Image: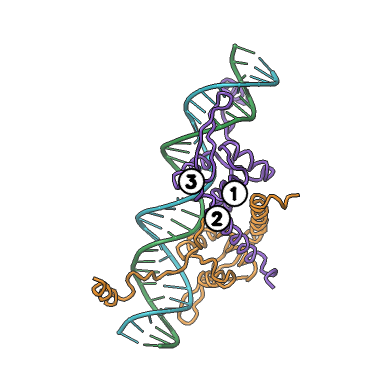
Chain colours: A purple, B orange, C green, D cyan
Amino acid sequence: MYKILMYICFSIGDCFVPRNDKKMKNSQLYKGSLNTIIMKLLEENGKMYGYEITQKVKAITAGELNITEGALYPALHKLEAEGILDVEIEKVDNRMRKYYKLTEAGTKETVNRLAELEDFIRTMQSLVNPKLEF
Amino acid sequence: MYKILMYICFSIGDCFVPRNDKKMKNSQLYKGSLNTIIMKLLEENGKMYGYEITQKVKAITAGELNITEGALYPALHKLEAEGILDVEIEKVDNRMRKYYKLTEAGTKETVNRLAELEDFIRTMQSLVNPKLEF
DNA sequence: TTTACATACCTAAAAGTGTTATGTATAAGA
DNA sequence: TCTTATACATAACACTTTTAGGTATGTAAA
C-alpha cells in the first residue's frame, strides 16, 4: 500500500503536500492586526507589493508570522477601496507587480492605528502582568 | 417633530438608549484574545463568575476594555466543553451564579496561552518598532 | 525536459470570533 | 414606578482569516 501511494504521489506531483505553507501562526491573537501591520510597513518603506509584504513580515519576525495570501490580497483591496492605499502597476521581468503606498488620508490613519496598537499592547500587558502596575 | 420623538421616547422608556454599553473597544485588535484573558484571570483568582469577569476586566483596564456578554458566555461554555474549565453553580442573594475555575488540563494550557501572548506581543513590537531590534 | 521551486497575482467556501440586539429574572435605590 | 445593577442566556449578523484552490512566468535541478 505504501508503494502504491508513493507511486500515485510521484505521478501527480505535489499531491498531499500543501502548496501554501504560509499562515499567520497558530494562535488567534493575530486576528485583527493585519491592517495595522500592512500600514506600518508601507509607512516605513514608502511602497511595497503584496508578495514583498509577506516576505518582509516573515523576515522581520524570523518566521514567527506568515501572512496568508488569502488574507493579504483582500485586505489590500479593501484598504484601497477605503482610500487608505493607492496602487500602481509595474511590470518587472515580465511579471506583474502591484505597488501599494499610503495616501495622505492613509498616512494620518496610520498614526491612529499605531496608537491603538500601543494601547492594546499596554492593556494586554496590564491584564497578563498586573504586578507591573505598581 | 423633535417634540414628538421625545414624547415617544419617554413613553416607552429606554428606547434608542442601548441597554448594553459594554463592548471590546473599537479596534479589531482584541479579537482572539478573549480566551487568554479569561484563563489568565481564573489562574490568578481561582474561581470567578461571568459577570465578575466583565467587571474585573473593566476595572483592571480602567474602562479601556469592555467584554460583551454575547462574547463572554459562549466563550465560557466553549472552554467548559473543551475541558479547560469546570463550572459550579451557587445561589447568592437569591441570584444564580456560575463559578468557573481551571481544570488541571486548563491550568497547563494556560501556561501555553500566556507564552503565546508574550510571543505575539514581542512580534508585534518588532514590527511596529523595528529600531529596538538592534 | 520534466519537475520543483520561487515569484506574483487572484478568489470562493468555510471556520472562527465578536457585536448587536434581544430575552429572562432578582434586588436596590430614586 | 422607573431605573440601574446584578446575572444568566442566545440568535442574527458582520468581519477577518484559513483553507484550498486557480493562473502565469522564470530558473535551477534531476
Task: Identify the mark nearer the N-term, 1 or 2.
Answer: 1
Please state the chain letter of the residue tagged with numbered disc 3 in the rendered image: A
Do marks 1 and 2 both belong to one polypeptide chain?
yes
Residue C12 found in image quarter? top left
**Labels 1 and 2 touching (C-beta < 8 A):** yes
Query: Mark 1: which amino acid?
Result: Lys
Nearest to the observer: residue A97 or residue C3: A97
Residue hosting label 3: A79
- Residue positioned most to the right: B134
Residue hosting label 1: A40
Tell me how many marks there are: 3
Q: Is residue B123 above or below residue A125?
A: above
Residue B30 found in image quarter? bottom right
Please state the chain letter of the residue tagged with numbered disc 2 in the rendered image: A
Task: Identify the mark nearer the N-term, 1 or 3.
Answer: 1
Q: Is residue B83 above or below residue A6?
A: below
Does dot 2 land on a helix, a strand or a loop?
Answer: helix
**Labels 1 and 3 touching (C-beta < 8 A):** no
Residue hosting label 2: A113
Q: Is residue A35 above or below residue A122?
A: above
